[in-house]
Image (cartoon, helix red, strand yellow):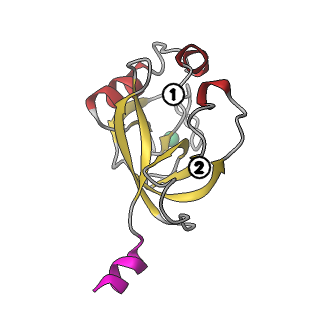
């Protein structure tokens, strides 16, 4: 990995998103949750997208979700990841509702994932040492039934 090119892609850690990054370091996915209606949101925002309340708390959530969409990158579009191809990037629908883009780990050598396949958040340090969230594909419910 080209660490310098990768580091330029990382979002800044600010007072507004610090709880998210603290959660990654602690091995849990933390989302803003509306203090009025309970709606979870990502990325962080000053008001609830549902009721416009400014009241919010940060909560650890399940870290589970499903694959909404994904792409396997074969082209070297980003210098940071030139030596990582092929790799998969996914659009995840979190169990709590918000969507999140993330790397799919451990799947690029396996079979093609399926739409709505379960995923779970996994945490670990990236090339710069910052703890980040990635997603691991889980066996689908249909596969579990078939395996019996
Ligand atoms: Zn709300």
Instruction: Label 1, secondary structure: give it.
Output: loop
When asked about the image quadrant of residue 84, the answer is top right
| C-alpha distance separating marks 1 and 2 | 27 Å
Q: Residue at x 55, y 33 (%)?
A: 43
In this picture, is 30 found above or below 129? below
State which quadrant residue 31 falls in.
top left
Instruction: Reply yes or no: does residue 142 show up in magenta.
Output: yes
Labels 1, 2: front one: 2
Q: Quadrant of residue 20?
A: top left
Where is residue 77? Give x, y as percent: 73, 33
Badge 1 crowding class, 10 Å Cα cut-off, few under 14, some 14 to 19, many 20 or more, is: some
User: Is 29 part of what is drawn in magenta?
Assistant: no
Q: Quadrant of the C terminus?
A: bottom left
In the image, is residue 120 above or below residue 80? below
Question: Position of 81 compared to 148: left or right?
Answer: right
Q: Position of residue 115 (x, y in %)?
A: 57, 67
Q: Identify which residue, 36 or 28, lies in the foreground.
A: 28
Residue occupied by mark 1: 54
The circle on residue 91 is 2
* CB contact under 8 Å: marks 1 and 2: no
């Amino acid at each position: 990995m080209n660490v310098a090119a990768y580091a330029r892609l990382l979002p800044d850690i600010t007072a507004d998103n610090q709880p998210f990054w603290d959660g990654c370091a602690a091995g849990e996915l933390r989302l803003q949750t509306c203090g009025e209606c309970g709606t979870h949101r990502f990325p962080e925002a000053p008001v609830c997208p549902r009721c416009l309340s400014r009241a919010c708390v940060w909560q650890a959530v399940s870290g589970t979700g499903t694959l909404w969409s994904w792409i396997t990158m074969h082209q070297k579009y980003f210098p940071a990841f030139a030596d990582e191809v092929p790799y998969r990037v996914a659009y995840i629908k979190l169990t709590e509702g918000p969507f999140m883009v993330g790397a799919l780990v451990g799947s690029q050598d396996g079979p093609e994932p399926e739409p709505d396949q379960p995923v779970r958040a996994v945490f670990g340090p990236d090339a710069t040492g910052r703890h980040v969230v990635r997603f691991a594909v889980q066996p689908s419910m249909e596969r579990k039934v078939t395996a019996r």
